[in-house]
């Protein structure tokens, strides 16, 4: 199992990086629409919504780039996990308050009368999946092809981990 963990973490890291880069990039390409999407949640003042609509895409892109190169994986995964919890809470909030909006999670967003409870449920389940990737990386940050110290899994490190686990098992027996 020890030899598989870095590969699973690599897939989680690249998958989460891709999600953050695409969602941040699409929002950054249309900042006016991003502002409309943030305002449609009715959670922030107009001036706060404006700043969130500018900073959120930049933050998502920064987190995505750090994950892509494998730098500070554990802290970035924790920050990403917190971000997805905020997203889940925001979607649940508009659903509970009876608003019908496109979440704007991947660009677009705003009022949308065609949205049903299924949309909100799908968005929440999707974000729970993304949160699970972030949680995995918070627990198992070391993966192949990572730049950060302590986040990279070299063959020697994996072999050492395996040897240590085998030694612990022998001692228990």
Image (cartoon, rainbow, N blue to C red):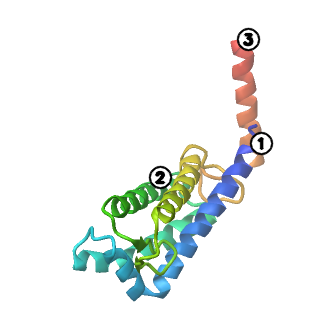
Does residue 54 show up?
no
Residue underneath mark 1:
3
Mark 2 or 1 closer to N-term? 1
Q: Secondary structure beneath disc 3?
A: loop
The alpha-carbon separation of the residues under discs 2 and 1 comes to 24 Å
Q: Which mark is residue 156?
A: none
Q: Which mark is residue 173?
A: 3
Q: Residues within 10 Å of mark 1 (few under 14, many from 20)?
A: few
Q: Secondary structure beneath disc 1?
A: loop
Question: What residue is at 56 percent from the left and 50 percent from the top?
Answer: 132
Does residue 19 show up?
yes
Counting every numbered tag in the picture gives 3
Quarter of the image with the N terminus is top right
Quarter of the image with the C terminus is top right
Question: What residue is at 48 percent from the left and 71 percent from the top?
Answer: 105
The alpha-carbon separation of the residues under discs 2 and 3 comes to 36 Å
- Residue 82 in the image: state x and y as whole percent: 42, 55
């Amino acid at each position: 199992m020890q030899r598989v963990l870095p590969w699973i973490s690599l897939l989680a890291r690249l998958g989460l990086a891709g999600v953050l880069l695409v969602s941040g990039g699409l929002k950054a390409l249309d900042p006016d629409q991003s502002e409309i999407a943030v305002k449609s949640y009715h959670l922030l003042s107009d001036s706060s919504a404006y700043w969130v609509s500018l900073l959120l895409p930049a933050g998502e892109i920064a987190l995505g780039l750090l994950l892509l190169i494998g730098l500070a994986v554990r802290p970035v995964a924790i920050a990403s996990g917190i971000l997805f919890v905020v997203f889940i809470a925001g979607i649940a909030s508009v659903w509970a308050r009876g608003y019908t909006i496109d979440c704007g999670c991947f660009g677009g967003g705003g009022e949308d009368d065609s949205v049903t409870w299924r949309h909100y449920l799908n968005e929440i389940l999707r974000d729970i999946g993304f949160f699970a990737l972030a949680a995995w990386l918070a627990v198992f940050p070391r993966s192949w092809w990572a730049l950060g110290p302590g986040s990279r899994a070299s063959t020697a490190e994996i072999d050492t981990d395996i040897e240590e686990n085998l030694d612990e098992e022998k001692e228990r027996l």
